[in-house]
Image: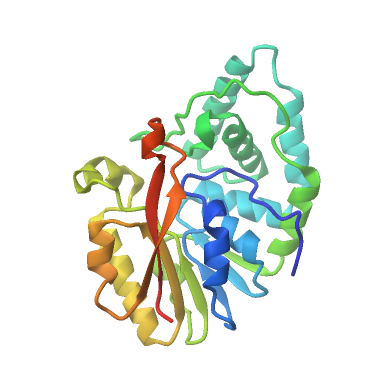
Amino acid sequence: MENSNITPFVKWAGGKRQLLPQIKERMPKQYNNYYEPFVGGGAVVFGLLPQRALINDINTALINTYKQIQNFPKDFLLAVGKLDMEMWEDGKQYYYSLREHYNDKMMKAEYDVELAALFVFLNKHCFNGLYRVNGKGLFNVPYNNRRGTSVDEKAIMAVSEYLQHVTIVEGDFEVACKDIKGGDFVFFDSPYAPLKPESFESYTKEGFDIESHRRLAGLYDDLSARGCYCMLTNHNTELINELYGGKGYKIDVVSVKRMINSDAKGRVGEEVIICNY
């Protein structure tokens, strides 16, 4: 399926848009089903548009947004349009009032079309498009001082049309992979291993600690033994090389621009693309 209108509807930390050419050229020539257990903003699935796909993420609010766009695109567009249109003169106060409303709905687990619209609005109007929560699970990213529309209507309809062919699940990456069979392809883009091992402490708030990385490497080995095609991206760190090196996997090092680093010299980094085929 080819549709140039299909682009991610949210900005996501660690999004893979800039690595897409390198990912595409390393894809297996043929595979059966496509699996992406850490879908995030969806740059890869929307870049490849596989015919039979399963996407997963542990972020419930994100997966709710995918499902609302899949099932109720027009209601979603109306809800986002209303949020954009009703923006106050004081955009900052408006943003914080909506952030509070969003967090209130999250606390009540109201996963509906309004929450999806708030999720996208906040993503478009928050600093750096980051999704970050505090210890209580409340979204706490500040306002980016920008006005403007949150979505492109045609793009959302194109995404919705494509998602009709996609299975959307929410939860742990291992559970998402339970039905994978030999000949299927899985793309792993897990939360990244920190560049400095000592920063794992602050990192565990994201729920992806060293143990999770070990568990993921175990799953990668298990799927490889089952005859699945696996590709994984991560920072080029000692931990990642220790987990995946020496097993006959192909480990390619690629240079990437780091968007978050404020020191320009620190903005070029190395990532690895690991394939088992």
| Residue 5 falls left or right of residue 131 | right
Whether residue 86 is visible to the viewer of this picture, yes or no, is yes
| Residue 207 falls left or right of residue 183 | left
Residue 251 in the image: above or below residue 256: below
Residue located farthest toward the top when viewing the structure as drawn:
89
Which residue: 70% across, 21% down? 87
The quadrant the N terminus occupies is bottom right
- Nearest the viewer among 267 and 249 is 267
Residue located farthest toward the front when viewing the structure as drawn:
265
Which residue: 47% across, 59% down? 38
> Residue 88's x, y, as percent?
69, 16
- Nearest the viewer among 36 and 66 is 36
| Residue 202 falls left or right of residue 15 | left
The quadrant the C terminus occupies is bottom left
Residue located farthest toward the left when viewing the structure as drawn:
198
- The quarter of the picture where residue 43 lies is bottom right
| Residue 198 falls left or right of residue 232 | left
> Residue 119's x, y, as percent?
59, 39
- Nearest the viewer among 161 and 255 is 255
> Residue 21's x, y, as percent?
57, 62
- Nearest the viewer among 259 and 220 is 259
Whether residue 169 is visible to the viewer of this picture, yes or no, is no
Which residue: 67% across, 44% down? 113
Residue 143 in the image: above or below residue 244: above
> Residue 118's x, y, as percent?
62, 35
Residue 44 in the image: above or below residue 186: above
- Specify the color scheme: rainbow
Q: How many numbered marks are there?
A: 0
Residue 75 in the image: above or below residue 243: above
- The quarter of the picture where residue 77 lies is top right
